[in-house]
């Protein structure tokens, strides 16, 4: 008869595997080598890390409580909570995530004639590029309007602008 599946039997391996994935993708992003789906994998697959860590906590509840009764255990937990709380504020600094939203909105809502200047091409060339990919465009419309009208993703359209070798 097969042994029943316990939380410990899946939580620890899942935590270890997800930790290695988070560590690897985190280091790739830290050093700017986040091409491809590195960032997406880091963000979405971190949910597996949370699931594994939650199961690991459940499976090791008594030892965890014993650790938290020690001075070192309390200090580690309090420092972690304090660092998390501190990371939620910008502390007067302008950060990348603060800028990404407004920049993306400006790019997506700008008429193609303005977007062409940002991309370093003529408005006519930009319109030709969209038309060559089967998206009828004119200089007055924005990427957002084209996306809605032709049911094409905004990132796909911006890829046609800034990554000219984007395949169909």
Image (tube, rainbow, N blue to C red):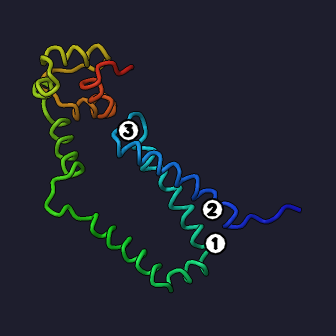
CB under 8 Å between discs 2 and 1: yes
Q: Quickly name the residue at label 2.
A: 12
Image coordinates for residue 98, horizontal then vertical, percent:
20, 52
Using the image, determine if residue 126 lies above or below residue 96.
above
Q: Is residue 149 left or right of residue 65?
A: left
Q: Secondary structure at mark 1?
A: helix
Q: Is residue 32 left or right of residue 146?
A: right
Image coordinates for residue 9, horizontal then vertical, percent:
70, 62
Residue at (42% x, 50% y) in the render: 43
Q: Quickly name the residue at label 3.
A: 34
In three-dimensional space, the C-alpha distance between marks 3 and 1, rounded to whole angstroms, equals 34 Å
Using the image, determine if residue 167 lies above or below residue 153.
above
In three-dimensional space, the C-alpha distance between marks 3 and 2, rounded to whole angstroms, equals 27 Å
Q: Is residue 28 left or right of residue 120?
A: right
| Residue found at the very far right of the displayed protein | 1
In three-dimensional space, the C-alpha distance between marks 2 and 1, rounded to whole angstroms, equals 9 Å
Which is nearer the eye, 21 or 48?
Answer: 21
Image coordinates for residue 62, horizontal then vertical, percent:
61, 81
Q: Quickly name the residue at label 1.
A: 59
Which is nearer the eye, 2 or 15?
Answer: 15
Sequence-wise, the earlier of marks 2 and 1 is: 2
């Amino acid at each position: 008869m097969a042994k029943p599946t316990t939380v410990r039997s899946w939580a620890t391996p899942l935590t270890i595997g997800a930790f290695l994935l988070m560590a690897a993708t985190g280091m790739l992003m830290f050093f700017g080598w986040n091409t491809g789906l590195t960032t997406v994998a880091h963000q979405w697959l971190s949910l597996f890390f949370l699931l594994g860590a939650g199961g690991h906590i459940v499976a090791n509840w008594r030892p965890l409580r014993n650790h938290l009764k020690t001075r070192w255990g309390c200090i580690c937990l309090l420092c972690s909570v304090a660092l998390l709380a501190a990371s939620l504020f910008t502390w007067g600094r302008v950060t990348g995530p603060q800028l990404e939203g407004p920049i993306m909105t400006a790019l997506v809502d700008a008429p193609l004639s303005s977007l062409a200047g940002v991309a370093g091409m003529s408005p006519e060339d930009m319109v030709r590029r969209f038309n060559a990919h089967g998206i009828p465009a004119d200089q007055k419309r924005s990427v957002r309007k084209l996306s809605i009208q032709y049911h094409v993703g905004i990132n796909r359209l911006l890829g046609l602008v800034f990554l000219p070798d984007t395949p169909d």
